[in-house]
Image (tube, rainbow, N blue to C red):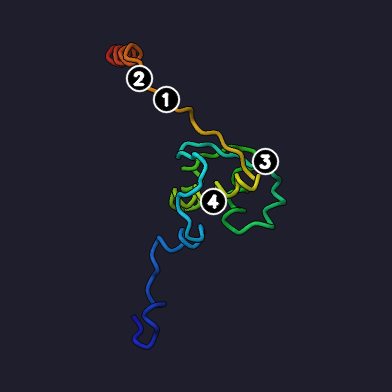
Amino acid sequence: MNPDADPGFDEDPGPLVRPFAVTRGRAGKNLHDLDIITLVVAVRPETDVATLDREYGEILRMCQGRPLSIAEISAKMNLLLVAVKVLVSDLINSGHLIFRSPPQVAGRPDIKLLQAVLDGVRKL
């Protein structure tokens, strides 16, 4: 550590500062029902990237022509899942992306199906 330098700027800010800055302090409020396996795909052309912030443009480029899950986007951008959910929700609201969440399973799993799977695994 340099004793002449300002101690507030000499240290690494840590991994949480960037996601906080990228999402402008928003976290988990007024988001679409996005799960880590929710698939998103771009519906606007890649030419719209020039008008967007860097992170939004990167997500739009990645989702051109093929759907990606929230988890894949998070891994490729090296951002926290909650930050990616905020960014993706913004792009959905602006009409750049559409999404498809997995169907919600209501109730308990079918016991007969689970037993059949277990019997099949035991036969292996």
Q: Which mark is residue 67?
A: none
Horizontal and vertical percent position of residue 104? 45, 28
Select label 2 or label 3 by which is in front: 2
Q: Say whether disc 4 or disc 1 marks the residue closer to the N-terminus.
A: 4
Q: Say whether disc 2 or disc 3 marks the residue closer to the N-terminus.
A: 3
Specify whether residue 76 is in view.
no
Q: Say whether disc 4 or disc 2 marks the residue closer to the N-terminus.
A: 4
Residue contact at pointers 3 and 4, CB within 8 angstroms? no
Q: Is residue 80 left or right of residue 66?
A: left
Alpha carbon distance from label 1 to label 3: 28 Å
Label 4: how many Cα within 10 Å (few below 14, some 14–19, many 20+): some
Check disc 2 and report the residue beneath it: 109
Q: Residue at x 49, y 40 (%)?
A: 34
Q: Residue at x 46, y 43 (%)?
A: 71
Q: Residue at x 60, y 48 (%)?
A: 91
Label 1: how many Cα within 10 Å (few below 14, some 14–19, many 20+): few
Check disc 3 and report the residue beneath it: 43
Identity, as a three-letter code, of the amino acid under mark 2: Pro
Check disc 4 and report the residue beneath it: 87
Q: Is residue 55 left or right of residue 119?
A: right
Alpha carbon distance from label 4 to label 2: 34 Å
Q: Is residue 47 left or right of residue 31?
A: right
Q: Nearer the viewer, residue 15 or 27?
A: 27
Identity, as a three-letter code, of the amino acid under mark 3: Val
Residue contact at pointers 2 and 1, CB within 8 angstroms? yes
